[in-house]
Amino acid sequence: MLSTLCLALLLAGCGGGAATSGSPGAQAPAPVVEDAWVRTTEGAKDTSMTAAFLTVSNPGDADIRLVSASTDVAGMVQLHEMVDSGGTKVMQEAKDGITVPAGSHVHLAPGGYHVMLMALKRELPVGEEVSLGLTFADGTTVAVTAPVKEFVEEEDHYHSPTPSMTTSP
Amino acid sequence: MADQPLDDSPAGASTPPVGRRRLLGYAGAAGAGLAGGTALGWGTAAARPTPTPPAVAPEVIRQTYSPHEAHQAGITTPTPAVTRLVAFTLGELAVQPLSRLLKLWSSDIEALMAGRPVLGDPTPELAQAGVSLSVTVGLGPRVFELPGLAAAAPDGFLDVPPMQHDRLQARWCGGDLVVLVAADDATTVEYATRRLVRDARTFATPAWEQTGSWRGTSGGRAVTGRNLFGQVDGTGNPSGELLEATLWPTDPPAWFAGGTTLVVRRIEMDLDFWDRTTRERQEKVIGRRLADGAPLTGQVEHDALDLLAEDATGAPVIPTDAHARRSHPDENNGRRILRRGLNYTHTEVVDGVPVTTSGLVFCSFQASIARQFVPVQTRIDTLDALNDWTHAIGSAVFALPGGFAEGDWIARSLLQP
């Protein structure tokens, strides 16, 4: 049922990303990425960084792991997670990536997982489109186009003081 | 004879005059104490009919519409309780920003009409399914001033020329874009409208907003509905094949397949003067009975008008200047429009004093404004008894593209062919 849905989505192209398989002859159905959007830098206190949100669905029988992301509008891209740090929640790089269990999905949403876009090369006003590439542990890549949307909730600087400066692939 | 039965009394049962009905209502708890029951013909308390709650009109309320049909929703779908129109002025008149806006709106509309929040929705809990939500998008004349788009304008798409009885106010006129947001309840309309207005911010600012209501059900049945004069309003609308021919151009430009045009006229109605007018005169002004919307020459609402019928003195039963006559296709070379009205009551403070006006947001849909709307409106402007009680204070025209396929967006084939 989910595979049929994913197939239909991929064929209809309704927001689902286009996937390419990393390993030839791989049997696992490609992950489906939907409802991607990027928070606008309009009105932001810090316009050098922003976040992308999306949902990853895994129609396959085995867990998959989102390990990295890329885009041409940011100098550095990291996957971030929310952790407890001395009683408060802070964001930090998800060094192990984001696991999407078999037959399930994971939301990257405000307050939770997200794709952090740092060292932005330009402002991102509402309505622009950002191309994002997502890479999974098995080498599969999915490309999505994400609209830039307003998100005015107060930007708590809930990131740990010095985000790690490891380069993203 | 009221058209809103108090209960499900069988058709043909006489409705008691107001006094007796109130007596029944207020004495409901008294039961057998209603000694006059026999005289009223209602028998004993045990036989008194019990009002049952009206059934939901299944084809009107709690609908789910899709933006992916051949035509946008909100044109032939039943008018729900609340509709808000918001017109916008484009900040930059250029293809790319307009395209971005329409893509954003298409994504929003797809989600909202399915009862889902939009991407990045700050109030996702307000999304609700099954509230008959429709969002209809229209392009104003300036869009066709974009380079290369002049030839793409639909046939006969133009602003309504000035009419003698108009008292147009600029604040209710024009617009580069419009959204019509309609739903079963005001909260849904307010939420959806806000999402669309916020997402448009980078590209367009609201120019005017017109909100109105319509009551399209009565006693659980779908009905035509009434304007604030109490008139049944919309009986003359075409249906079936006639409706198709009225709305959809026969040979539209490719991008406009499934599209139609919209005229929005804000019509102010003098309710005080109407209230002072005798019922007989009111019915002659329209040419229809108030009780049930039947033509003065007919028995029931949907009887055809007999424009040739004369009374004993040889005068036409439907007066020469009656609105139903002046707007009738037979007096307009077969021209028809689809009209959908929204009742409004608007209070604003003028020089420190609240002023309330009422009227109708008159939405007219037709394949060609020039060939259908303008000639009929001109005929009405020339002579129509109703002009003494109404006049337009706003006018705007829009081209409504066809529906968009999944993965596509509104008017893409116009802007990115």
Image (spheres, rainbow, N blue to C red):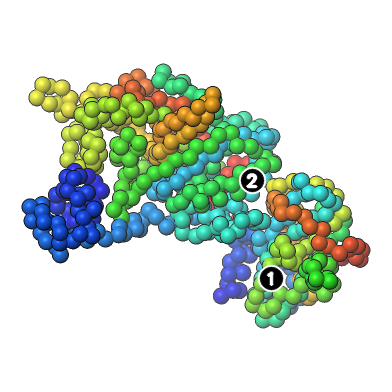
Q: CA distance from mark 2 to mark 1?
A: 27 Å
Q: Give the position of the N terminus of chain B as an image quadrant.
A: top left
Q: Residue at x 23, y 53 (%)?
A: B26
Q: Looking at the image, is A125 positioned above or below residue B7? A: above
Residue lying at 19% horizontally and 50% vertically, measured from the top left:
B23
Q: Compared with residue A62, is residue B145 higher up or lower down, i.e. above or below?
A: above
Q: Position of residue B158 (x, y in %)?
A: 50, 28
Residue type, label 1: Val
**What residue does disc 1 label?**
A106
Image quarter of the C terminus of chain B: top right
The image quarter containing residue A16 is bottom right
What is the chain letter for disc 2?
B
Residue situated in front as seen by the camera: B369 or B118: B118
Indicate left or right for B128 with B23 as reference.
Answer: right
Which of the 4 image quadrants contains residue B32? Answer: bottom left
Q: Is residue B279 left or right of residue B160?
A: left
Question: In what element is the residue under mark 2?
Answer: helix
Q: Secondary structure at mark 1?
A: strand
Residue plotted at (71% across, 54% down): A153
Q: Which residue is mark 2?
A: B198
Residue flagged by tag 2: what amino acid is it?
Arg
Horizontal and vertical percent for residue A61? 67, 81
Query: Is residue B313 positioned above or below B200 on the image?
Result: above
Which residue shows up at 17% across the image and 40% down it?
B299
Q: Position of residue B98 (x, y in %)?
A: 65, 40
Q: Is residue A80 above or below residue B233?
A: below
Q: Chain of mark 1?
A: A
Outermost residue on the bottom side: it is A61
Taking the image as shown, residue B12 lies to the left or right of residue B373, namely left
Foreground label between 2 and 1: 2
